[in-house]
Amino acid sequence: MEGLADKELITMSVMSRLNELPPGGDNAPDLIWRDLCARIVTCSDIKTVATINEAAELMMAGFACVFVCGCKKALAVGVQGYAYRGIEEPETEILQRGSREGFIEPMKINISLLRRRVKSPDLRLESLKVGDTVPVDVTICYLAGAASSSLIDDIKLRLGDVHFQSAFTSGCLRKYLEDGHTLFSGVGVSERPDTVCAKLCEGKAAIIVDGTPSVLIVPHLMKENFTTLDDYSAHPYFAAITRWFKYAAFAISILLPGVYAALAGFSPEFFPNELLTRVTTSVSKTPFSVFTEVLLFTFIYEIMREAGLRLPKTLGHAVSIIGGLVIGDTAVTSGFIGAPTLMIVALTVICSYVIPDLYAPISLLRFLFIIAGGLWGVWGVAALLCLVMLELCAKKSLGEEYVLKNKA
């Protein structure tokens, strides 16, 4: 299979060695097979296959198969040599103090990055295939003694129930590892080997999918979204303050627009006098209500964000200019939207960037709180907040409490 195997390795380990075969006689197939296995073919990864399906599967993985006429078996030689990108720091997880290495697409290299850091015989690797039409190699990594056997059995049971064509990304397996359908995910994702190794030492399991640099971590708790490896490199007091800042940013990112719409529409007496005057003046100059302004501008921002993610990098600057000048300054100057609304939405968006792992539930909750506050006021925001807290307290990640960890 051109592109999957190394031609130079095939020549050295297989082709040049076949000239050493002795001349055959009546038992030529058996003699050839014995010599092939004993001394002719030299390679660190040699397997014996008995069916054509096994041979085809190994060839698709970069093996070279040697067939002997008259023999019911074939010899598969590991001569993989496909191209892959180099190890570099992942763009999605930037640390000030930490390793600059990140996972890449080949699974064997990702496993070697873990073994370099966890130099312990307790590191266990269990391989299985997922997918009905195009099976994909999946490896479960954990530390024996740290991870419970029930957790590993549960993971293998859930992955065994996966029935679809193929898992080309690790995200395809997330829904099978979740405990029900909720806003918050109980499965963590990381592209950093040091982060995964730290989670393995905490008794968690990592799931590596061949062909993707994103590694799944289970179980994943709510508090882990607010923790990074930089917290362990800084002074304890600074790490504690930073973590409280993250919790505050999370609350602001989901509640501020909804609370602002609720107070402006139903309870303006809660505003200070000077702020109320400015909000009233701003609303009187715009054609929409505060609820409509907040909802519309939040929707426009999400459209701009999606456009910035999907457009080529060469056009990304154009999106930034349009968003900052045209939709921002021009919209306020023309009276299409009020300046307080623009400031509220901008502050909310900045706070949501503080916790990138929770951006998806934050975006959805932001819209829900805006709708609840615009339609039912402060009571609508309070009722929805209670529902969110109930969901968080009831959620579990592979049997472990998502928020309130069971001390027993």
Image (cartoon, helix red, strand yellow):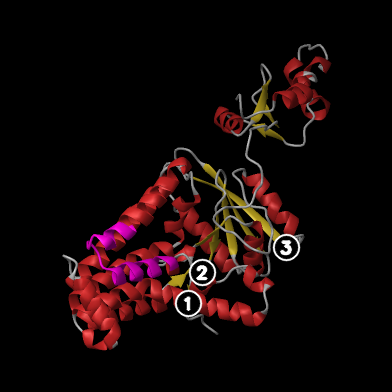
Q: Report the quarter where the N terminus lies.
A: top right
Q: CA distance from mark 1 to mark 2?
A: 10 Å
Q: Which residue is mark 2?
A: 225
Q: Nearer the viewer, mark 3 or mark 1?
A: 1
Relative to the observer, which residue lies in front, 185 or 10?
185
Which residue corresponds to the image point at 34% horizontal and 75% vertical from the top-left? 256
Find residue 182 and report its image quarter: bottom left
Q: CA distance from mark 2 to mark 3?
A: 27 Å
Could you say whether the residue bearing mark 3 is in a helix, strand or loop?
loop
Q: Position of residue 405 (x, y in %)?
A: 51, 80
Whether residue 65 is situated above or below residue 123 in the rendered picture: above
Give amino acid for label 1.
Tyr
Q: Position of residue 141 (x, y in %)?
A: 63, 57
Find residue 299 and report its image quarter: bottom left
Tag shown at residue 122: 3
Q: Residues within 10 Å of mark 3 (few under 14, many from 20)?
A: few
Give amino acid for label 2.
Asn
- Among the two numbered marks 1 and 2 on one chain, the one whose residue lies closer to the N terminus: 2
Find out whether the residues at labels 2 and 3 contact each other: C-beta distance under 8 Å.
no
Q: Which residue is mark 1?
A: 247
Q: Nearer the viewer, mark 2 or mark 3?
A: 2
Is residue 299 in sight in this rendering?
yes
- Among the two numbered marks 2 and 3 on one chain, the one whose residue lies closer to the N terminus: 3
Q: Position of residue 400 (x, y in %)?
A: 50, 74
Judge whether residue 206 is colored magenta. no
- Among the two numbered marks 3 and 1 on one chain, the one whose residue lies closer to the N terminus: 3
Q: Main secondary structure of the magenta part?
A: helix
Give amino acid for label 3.
Asp
Q: Residues within 10 Å of mark 2 (few under 14, many from 20)?
A: some
In-image side of 340 versus 215 (left or right): left
In magenta, the rendered stretch is: 328-350
